[in-house]
Each structure stands twice: as C-alpha cells, then as structure tokens.
Amino acid sequence: MSTAIAAPTDAQAPSADEADKPPVLLARLWARPGGKAALVLVVLLVLAAILAPVLSGLEGQDPNTYHDELLNSATGGSPLGSFGGISSAHWLGVEPTTGRDVFSRLLYGARISLMVAAGATLGQLLLGLLVGLAAGLGNRWIDGLLSRFTDLALALPSLFFSIALLAVVPQTFPRPLLLCLILAGFGWASTARIVRAETLVLRERDYVAAARLYGASTWRVALREILPGLVAPVVTYTALALPGNMVAEAGLSFLGLGVQPPTPSWGQMLSSASTWFEVDPTYVLVPSLTLLLCVLTFTGLGEALRKAADPRSVTR
Amino acid sequence: MTVFLFRRLLSALAVLLALSILVYGLFYLMPGDPAELACGKRCDVSELAQVRHAMGLDRSIVAQFWTFISSLFVGHSYDTGVGTTWCSAPCLGFSFQSNEPVTQMLLDRLPVDLSLALGSAVLWLALGIGFGLFAALRPNGLRDRMTTLVAMTFSATPLFVLALLLLIVFCVWWQVLPFPTYVPLTQDPGQWFENLLLPWLAIALVTAGNYLRLTRAGVLESLGQDHIRTLRAYGYSERRVVLRHAVRGALPTLATMAAVDIGGVLAGAVFTESMFGLPGLGKLMVDSANNVDLPVVTGITLLAAFLIIAANAVADVLYAVLDPRVRLA
Amino acid sequence: MTQNTDTAAALGAPLRVEDLRVSFPGARGGELTALAGLGFELAQGQALGLVGESGSGKSAAALALLGLHRGTAARVDGRVLVRPRAAGAEVVDVNTADERALRSVRGRELAMIFQEPLTSLDPYRRVGDQIAAVRRMHFGESRKEAAQRAAEALEKVGIDAAGKYRAFPHEFSGGMRQRALIAMALVLEPRVLVADEPTTALDVTVQAQILDLLTELRRETGMSLILISHDLAVVGGTVDEVIVLKSGEQVERGPVRKVLTEPQHTYTQALLAAIPRLDAQLPEPKPADDAKPPLMRVRGLEVTFPAKRGAALTRAVAGVDLELREGESLGIVGESGSGKTTLGRSLVRLQQPTAGTIEFDGRPLGSWRGRELRRHRRDLQLIFQDPASSLNPRRGIGDSIAEPLRVQGEKDDARLEASVCGMLERVGLDPKLYHRYPHQLSGGQRQRAAIARALILRPRLVVCDEPVSALDVTTQAQVVALLRELRAEFELTLVFIAHDLAVVRQVSDRIAVMNAGRVVEILPAADLADAQDPYTRTLLAAVPELPHV
C-alpha cells in the first residue's frame, strides 16, 4: 500500500466533537428562544380549546344562556357596568343584545377555529404533497398536466369562490366540514407548487442519480432519498399556512357565511361586535385580540420553524 | 418581444376560458333550482316554467353554456314573456334581486375599487420599500429587528380585525377621521381623500409587510453577490451601492408582486368594503351571496378572475422587461 | 527586476504590505486566523504571485489589500500602504484610512479582478455602461468622454467595442466577461492590478489567452500585478516573484524560477511534487488483450437535449464511436461544453441516448428493463465530480455506502457493516467515520466515501466524472493514486473524465480528446506529445508549463 492511501489530514476536517447526529427540527426549534415561547403558547391554546367545557364550568357559565338582566334596555341592549360588563361572574363580560357569556363563547369558538384551521391545513398538505410529488417525480406529460392544473387553481379568485360556494351549498351540509373542504380546496395548489419545486431540485442531486445507478427503484428513491429532504420545507410551509386558514375561517364567518349561530365562532362575534364598537369597545377588543394572539402565535411558530430549518442559521 | 406578449396573451385567454367553464358549472349546475331563486318565494308552477324558459334552463347544458359565453361577446335578448329585453355585450344577465343588468352594476362599483387599489398601493409601496431599505441598511441591528417584528405583526393581522381597531382608535377615541362613506373623486376630491384614508391605511398596513420583507431580503441577497463586491472594489460608496444597485436586484420581484396585489384589490376588497361600508365589488359580492343572487355572483367572480389573470400577465411582462436575463421568445 | 526592490522603495513603491493579519470569529468565542502576517513590497511594474491551497489565506489577503473586509466580522491588523501617484499625495493605509480616502484608492490605485467572471458584473446593466460609470466616478468626466474611454478599454482587451459595448453580461462567455472586468480595471489606469484566481473558472485555452493578455498589458502600461492562484504553474509563467502561503503563514518567498526549481520549504516541495506533469514518466501500460471482445462498444452515439424556450436544441454528443477493452483505462478530455460529461453519463445509462447504440458485454445497454436492469446496474458505476452533492446529507456515510448492498438484496446487518468497514479501510478512511455525516468530512474524505459506495457492488466498469477537480492539488494527487491502486486491485475498467490533460494522462492507457460533442482523436497516453489533431495540439499548448526540477 502506498503512502497516498494513508488517511488524509486535510485542514478542513472538522473536529471530532461535532461528530454527533445533526439535531432534528424539533430540537433545533426548542433551542431558539422564540420557538420555545411559540411552542408553549400553542400547546396552551390547544389545551384551552379542548378543555372549553371544564374552563367554562370553572367560571360557572355556559356559552348559550341569555342574561337579559345584565343588559341596558335604554341603549338597545348594551351590557350594564363598565368594560362590557366584566365581573367576577362573567370574566370577559357579556354579549350585547343577548347577554351571553363572552369568556365561554370565546373558548367554544376556539374549538371551531382550531378544528377548521387544522383540518383545512391537513387537507391542503395531503393534497399538495400528492400532486406536488407526482408532478415532480412523474414524466414530462404528467408534470405538464398537473402543473397546468396547479396554475389554474392558483389563478382562481379564491375568496370570491369561497363566498359563492358557501352561499350556494345548502345549509344542511355540515359547515365546519364544508369550510375545511373549501379552504383545503383552494390552498393545496400553493403547497403543491412548493413540493414540486423542491422535488425537482432534489431529484437533480447527484446522490439521487447514484441511487438509480445502484439499482434503487423509483419508490425507494422517492421514500429514502427525496422525501426526507422535503420534510423541513413542507413542515415550515404548513406551519405558516395554518394561521392563514385560521384567518380565512374567521373572515368567512365574519361575513356571515361560516359556522351558523347558535354555534359560537370568533368571526361571528367580531361581526356582531362591528355594529357595537362605538358603545361597547370591550366586546370588539376581546375577540379581536384573542384572534390576533392566536394568529401571531402560530405565525411565530412558523417563522421559528423556518429559521430552525434553514441550515445557514445554524450557528454551532 | 411581440412573440412573448402573444404567447402570454394566448395562455391568459386559455386560463380564462377554463375558469368561465368552472364558474358557470359551479353556480348553475349546483343542487337547487336557479329558476326558483329567480322567481322568488310566491311562485306557482306555471310561472316557474315560464321563468325557466326565459332563463333558458329548459335547454341542454351545452346550449346554456354557449348562450352564457356568446352573450358576453355579442349580447343576448331575453324573452320575459311580456316582451323581449336586449342585454348588450358584454352581457352577464340580470340581477334576480333588482332586475338591473349585471354589467352595469359592476361598472358602477368599479370606481370604488379603483380608488381603493391605487391609493392603498401607493401607501403600501412607500411603507414597504421605505422601511425595507431602512431595515436592510443595518441588518440584524435593533432597528432591523424592530421594523421586521412590527411589519410581521401587521401582516399577520386579519384585515377585518385591523379595520375594527383602526375605527375604534381614529373614529371613536381620537375622533380625527370621519366614519368612512364613499364620496366619488369627481364630486369632491377633498372628501374622497379624507374618507378613503382609513381604508387605504388598513389595506396598506396588512400588505406592506410582504414588501418590506422582500425589499430587505432582496437588498441583503444582492449585497452578498459578487457584482456588488466589484462595485465596492472600484470605490463606490456604500449608500450608492445599496440605493442604486442592490435595490435593482429586488425590483423585478417587487414589481410583479405589486401587479398581482393591485389586481387583487381591484377585483374587490371584500373585508375592507364590508368593514367600512364602501359600495364596491366586494360588498356587492357579499350581499349578493347572502341573497343567492346568482347572476351577480357569477358576474363578479368572472370579473375578478379576469382582473387577476390580467394582473398576472402584466406581472410576467414586467418581470421580463425588468430583468434582461429573461429571454423574450 | 526583483533585485531592484530596495531602490524601488526609495523611489516610492506603489504598494507596501506590513505584517498583514486577518482573523474571523470562530466557534465558541474563539478566533480563526486566516492570515498570520504577510509582508511584501511591490515595485512599479513588478509582478508578484501569491500561491496556496484552500485555507491558505490567499483570498483573505486579496480582500484585505482593498479593505474589502470592512463591514464584515473579520479583524484585520497590520498595514497596507498605498502611495498614490499624484505628486505630494500622502501615503494611504488601507486598513485605517477614512471612507473617502479608501474609495479614492479602490480602483484608481489598486484595481481588482475576481475569480467568478460569470457573476462579478452587474447583470442588469450594459457592459460598456458599467465601465464608463466607473471612469466617470473617479475622473468626473462627461458621459460622452467616459463612454469613449470605456470603448477604448474594451478594444484594448480584445473586445469589439462597436458591437459589444451595449451587450449585457449574460450575453458574454466566461472569457469575455473576464476581459470586460480587466477593461473595467484598465479604464482607471491603476498602478497595481490585483487578480484573484482570474482563470480558475475558465477553460485551459481561455486561461492561456487571459494570462497572455495580463502579461502584455503589464508591459504596455507599466502597472504592477499581484496574481493570486492555487496553481503554481499558472503563477510560474506570469510573475517575477512568488510567495507561498500555507494555513495563513508565509512559508517561502523568492524569485519564481528559484522557488520552482529549488524549493526550500518541504511544503513547497510537496506541492510541486503533487502537480501532475505532462512530461512525467508513465508506468508501462498493460498489454491489451486484443483477442477478447471489447467490454463496451459505442456506435454512433448521439445525445440531443430538447430546445429550451428561444434557444436552439443542443447536441451535447454528436456521433461518438468508442471501444473499451476489459481492464483498460480510457481518459476523456475536453473543455466545458465538449459533451464529455453527457457521454460519461450515457455509458452508465444515466442519460438516454438520442441515437446510436452502446453494447456492454455483448448486449445492448438499452435492452434491460425493470428488475433485470436494476440487477445489471451493479456492473456500471459512476463517481461524481462534487462529493458534497453525491452523498445524501441526511445520512451517515456508512449508511450511504451500505445502501447499494441493501438495494441489491443484502439483509444481514452484521454482514453489511463488516463489508462497509472493510471498504472504508480500503479507500483509506477510518471505520470510526462510519456514522459521520458528509458535512463533517473534508472534501478528500467525502470523495473517498463516494468511491467506496461506487465500488462496494464490485462493478466492472466505473466512470469517473471529474473526480478530483473539486479538490486541492495535494488531495488530488492522493485520490488519483488511490484510484490507480483500486483499479488494479478490483480489475476495473475505468473511464476517467477531466478537463486537465495532465491529470487524465496519469491514470489512462488511452486518451480520447473531445470537442463540440465529437471525439477528435484517440491515442495512447504515452504518445500524447505527438498528437496530430490541431485541437489536441491547441489544448497541449495552452497547458501552463512548469520548469524542470
């Protein structure tokens, strides 16, 4: 054996203490202060929604009981007392005209909001992943067809379509499910486009060519070489799509087209609040700020994920 | 260049055709009878049949669609039973609710959206690009972080929440601005401006964040590029490098995004109009949807699709013009 | 000229560097020293070479000369003294000068050209305008005057100003862009030109033209030149004096002839020994067994890529005939765009040919389908140019090397690990590196891992596509030696593709020269010097020569 075979002593060889596995996304996320805060808040929000009956019970109220005795009939039904009728019995006040408890309506509204946002995002993710992968891995014909289809879906004025669909579909169809379907139906295209673009980049990598060379099947290449590379961008994108869906659901309910009363939802609360903002600003601020907090928390989580997934931001 | 424009136009037309089939199919072939909706609640069987005939619903789907498309280009005459009404091209039918021609209804609303789009675009471009540069001049410094954080917060805020908050702050607490009502520009420019300020601000604050992020990222990316290093090595001042050359790199993307966003507002700012009570396309859409006024809903959706597709085509052309490396063929 | 350094200083040399140090903040609060004390004086008209491998600090030095580390995290100590030409002007220390003084020095006194001509010009502005703008800024001339000067500068570097002044950079070839950058430097009439790896991204024939141009311009204008390169041969033919850098330290300095023929420092000696030479003694080629049928036979091979929007369709390979005998090593040499990579990929069936046939072991390569194809894949392997991209970044290298065996049906984990460890040792890697990820290895180690993965299936034919061009000279020599040994041990038939004639010659029995998609000549490696084809002769003439030791 010649000297050339001896293990090389290149200057760039990193030191041995870096020989550990590259940290997984979640660990990298947890390591960022912003990521930690966002994760904790998200868990709290989800818990609050799940435990809505328990928490309302703690307050001693429920979302659907009318409290006419707490309203001022002279002003057309604004809550008695300052700050929208906030008291030890009604922690966040009561609703004008009906006197229903705002705190418990907010909690039950969170269930709808999170459920629809999660459902829509999941649907959008699955559809987008399927179409994007098929386009990215398929032959030119499949790719062309699916890409044109994606372009078409992206050119739709999605808000107008959603409004029209919600108006046309009979009320007997369950609204939360319809909202999920509509939001996923308009959201998948952007996911698909990202998945396709990432797949096209990955499939040109030499290690994919190498895998084909040693005889790996297309499935094996997709599962073992390409899919792992898609995890970070897709997770990040999904995390950022979720607050978008949350806003969209609240918006459609705000327009009176989403979940129908008496089921409480944030959009409806805001819609009825918008006629009261001069008399009872508290009733506007409470759901506004709650929705804002939720959206910002999820956006923050998405941003933190994006930074954690970006290898350039790893400072080790 | 002409070849490029022609190709782009052709593909835009193809998308539009596909969309109109989709729109028509979605709204007219849904469960539920459009004739019943058009006729109203107290409608007996013979009246219903008459309405159905007048609307052409007794003919085949293909024939119906053909009528729908051809009336867009050559107009259509409606048999109302009493006589015929001529609906001139581009004909989108008559509203179930008011019996007005839909095309005229849309044209009446368009100035509102035009005002909204242009005013807010000026504002969001100024805010976004201005603060983007501000942030990029000292990347990762305190002011960069603060600007980015504020911008992110605004762009994550739902438009209707922001509009409500603006109303409370400016109209209820401070009382410095009137509760907006639409005053046409031709009637009183001063009033027009004062009333639209709040809606503009709402749209601009939500939109500007993307432009800030893009400007900042574009400038920072350019600053790391080799040709910028060349400029520095040849004695260009940092100011000139950033303001003249690094911004240039972000320009094509900014311009295309602006084209698409302006097209979006033009097609109808649903939440802004509902919130501030402005009589634009978005408000009309929501009202018509709540009344299941199919011809109006179809008309607006089609117009919106047209505007968005046109905006995308403009965006592509802008990009090609602004980046010499894109081959125009 | 070098003997006059001292007198030149007395007259006011244009540039003097004293104890220049550059360091970057490193991991965990530490500091990484990129350059640890560089000092020299550059006389008017003198040409100085800075030579070193990656990590030697030569690029950090180049940027420090113009104060381009400002605004970054780098710390620069020492002095870079520039004496402006204007009579009575004060000497400027680039390291401490204020923004204004520094800008008056940049370009005007010290002009710089860069390694990446493809990206070093502003893509949004016309080439002529960019040059004129630089002139206008420093000289305050009118638009018309500046445009006139820019046109003159373009003509001087051999670009037709009338036709190309209004062109955009993307319409230029790499060599043209480097010429345009040189024109940008010339238009300011600088006293010193700093050229940082100016020819590394260029083909060897273009490299020769640019180096000639630099020498000619230096003679014509009397400016001084600092040429920074990893390639001793490039520097050798162009400069008067040379400084050899290693890990930021100046290890040797002297007149270029002397350093190249009588290197004093062991590192310089090793560096010189590692450079492949066209006139080096070759081992006796194995006598070819003509009786056996060839292992691979290529007939009329054509590969055409579909036309991109607006561009014509490209014929990457335009009719190639080849025969590969079992156990031989065929080198394929050509410049960028010659089709050598596409040909190599076709041989292992990564690229579907448009026309023509490839027979392997007497059977057409295209006839295998599905499972049978996958089984036969193991006979044909490829080693890629960039080991960073040929190994999956999300998998440890041991796992990557085991994957081919798994795909081919090996299930027993213990047996897998044993074979992988054996192979790791065989390519000169410590089996302890089994669980390391590619980004934790050096370039040379990665390429060894990629070789191990290609060989673990015991292929019969291995195509190496520029396997060493991403590596430093000394690492290059080690990997080439490894390939030579493995070839003998595994009885491989080798196709070795590279742009560097001297490298190809080291490992090949025969050499095929490619140009514009065709093989223009095939000849025994030993007879390369007697090549007949005019294109081969051009290639040979363009290779920078090193003096004999």
Image (spheres, helix red, strand yellow):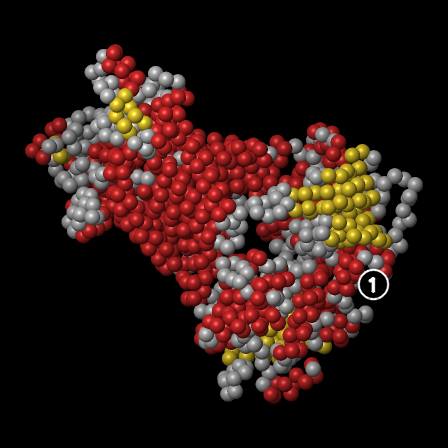
**Residue type pointed to by label 1:** Asp
Q: Is residue B284 left or right of residue C104?
A: left
- For residue C453, say whether it is visible: no
Q: For mark 1, name the chain.
A: C
Query: Which corner quadrant of the image does residue B162 belong to?
Result: top left
| Residue that protrudes farthest toward the top in the picture | B45
Q: Nearer the viewer, residue A160 or A187?
A: A160
Q: Residue at x 44, y 55 (%)?
A: B250
Q: Is the C terminus of chain C in the top left, top right, bottom left or bottom right quadrant?
A: bottom right
Vertical position of residue A178 compared to residue A85: above or below: above
Q: Is residue C257 left or right of residue A146?
A: right
Give coordinates of residue B165: x percent, y percent. 23, 44
Q: In the image, is residue A201 above or below residue C120?
A: above
Residue B64 spot, x, y in % from top left = 37, 22
* Residue C523 image offset from top left, x and y in percent: 84, 53
Rendered residue at 47%/66% (across/down): C71
Which residue has dot 1 on it? Answer: C279
Can the viewer see residue A94?
Answer: yes
Quarter the N terminus of chain C occupies: bottom right
> Which residue lies at the image location 66% right of the left edge and 67% below the top edge?
C210
Q: Residue furthest right?
A: C291
Say which quarter of the image contains residue A134. Answer: top right
Which element is circle 1 on?
loop
- Horizontal arrangement in the rendering, residue B119 relative to residue C102 (left or right): left
Q: Residues within 10 Å of mark 1 (few under 14, many from 20)?
A: few
